[in-house]
Image (cartoon, helix red, strand yellow):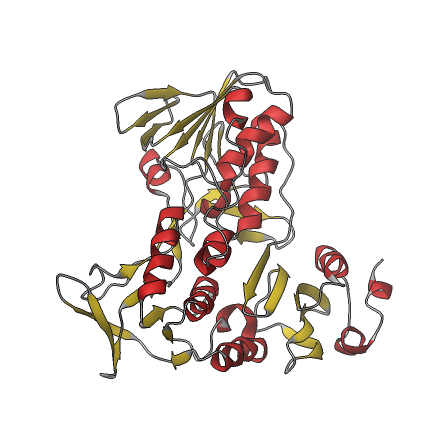
Amino acid sequence: MPEPSRIVIIGGGLAGATAAGELRERGYSGDVVLLAEESHRPYELPALSKAVLLGEADEPDWVHEPGFYAERGIELRSGVIATRVELGARVVRDSAGAEHPYDRLLLATGSVPRRLPVPGADLPGVWHLRTLDSALGLRAAFQEAERVVIVGAGWIGTEAAAAARRHGAEVTVVDQSALPLQGVLGDEVAEVFRDLHGEHGVRWELGAAVAELTGGPERVRGVRLADGTELPADVVLVAVGVQPRTELAHTAGLELADDGGVAVDAGLRTAAPDVYAAGDIAAHFHPRYGRRVRVEHWANAKNQGAHVAGNLLGGHEPYVRAPYFFTDQYDLGCEYRGLADVDTDEVVVRGDLAGRRFLAFWLRDGKVTAAMNVNDWEHGDTLKALVDGQVPATGDRLREGDLAALLP
């Protein structure tokens, strides 16, 4: 496959910016055009719900230093919204009417927060966290608020709850599940996070649905639950997940997967010639799992962005990394690797759940499919090897045995 003369990347987030930089690292000398909607240069998202929201930083972690793009001849077009991809003509059109022809195209458009489909969802004082500007604005709102209600008990919701408590607000978290993070971690480990936040003064409204956000033209005043419970609020954060931004792909006629992402093969290629997708939107056929997987975490965007650069230049390497994420909440820090099915996998805990220093493993067909270290920083590499190798193990050996001895 001949090397392309012009590569266009739609999306100025972590996946797109990493891919652009990696193209130059691999010696590519053709044109690289990076279309980015935000005015800020590309940045990573984890700090938004952690250091920035906590008040420990005013900036995120930037993907590259300010002069990186110009010095390497990467044409970073900030504030540019791509509106149409014409596959036959091999051109991207933007909102200003400009055309961006390509030989190869990478879609890395990311995702947007889901909205609540209830009355009052657009009232002033209702926040969604996704951008640097929204993180800075939400932090200021937390600092002024007396009562904060967070709708959603996933990773963003629980991290934001910790930040709001740091700023002194009363915090209530609402979720339809019986436990925070239940769908990701299962009951036994999810209880650790419920109790952690409870000890720090967070009030839970679990197994509850939101019927309405109440207030007036000036601002939100509360949350009304389906059972009629009224939760007063100065600030409401909606953290009920994200949806992939696939409008461009859909309009262009690209195949979408059942989960709403852009269908790509093991090498992150779509069915359209010379068109690839990476990051939050990529419903990737993962060789390890034998099915499509779409991951919305930071490490996936970064690693897929670096990986797809090689395939944009003619490679055919499959992307095989296991998902990874991390969180920091109060005095709890943890890392998670792999992809568990909490409804069917066997969970094995090693260490002290009550003391919040432990390892958790998920077993499927006698093999380690996912692992998590909580306030334990000695075993990260071993857990990675166990997950990457889908190493056979028993619950007893994981609880009591020498973990390193399990490795091939």
User: Can residue 7 be seen at all in this image of the molecule?
Assistant: yes
Residue at 57% across, 67% down: 341
Q: Residue 135: percent from the left, percent from the top?
A: 39, 53
| Horizontal side, residue 332 vs residue 389: left or right | left
Q: Residue 352: percent from the left, percent from the top?
A: 69, 80
Q: Between 388 and 233, which is closer to the camera in this rendering? A: 233
| Horizontal side, residue 38 vs residue 299: left or right | left
Residue 120's place in the image compared with 45, above or below, is below
Q: Between 152 and 105, which is closer to the camera in this rendering? A: 152
Residue at 50% across, 73% down: 182
Residue at 37% across, 21% down: 100
Q: Quadrant of residue 364?
A: bottom right
Q: Residue 8: percent from the left, percent from the top?
A: 45, 26
Residue at 33% across, 30% down: 80
| Horizontal side, residue 240 vs residue 75: left or right | left
Q: Quadrant of residue 386?
A: bottom right
Q: How many marks?
A: 0
Q: Quadrant of residue 391?
A: bottom right
Residue 68's place in the image compared with 251, above or below, is above
**Which image quadrant: the C terminus?**
bottom right
Residue 333's place in the image compared with 73, above or below, is below
Residue 356's place in the image compared with 341, above or below, is below
User: Can residue 173 be seen at all in this image of the molecule?
Assistant: no
Q: Residue 43: percent from the left, percent from the top?
A: 48, 41
| Horizontal side, residue 36 vs residue 219: left or right | right
**Which image quadrant: the N terminus?**
top right
Q: Residue furthest left?
A: 217
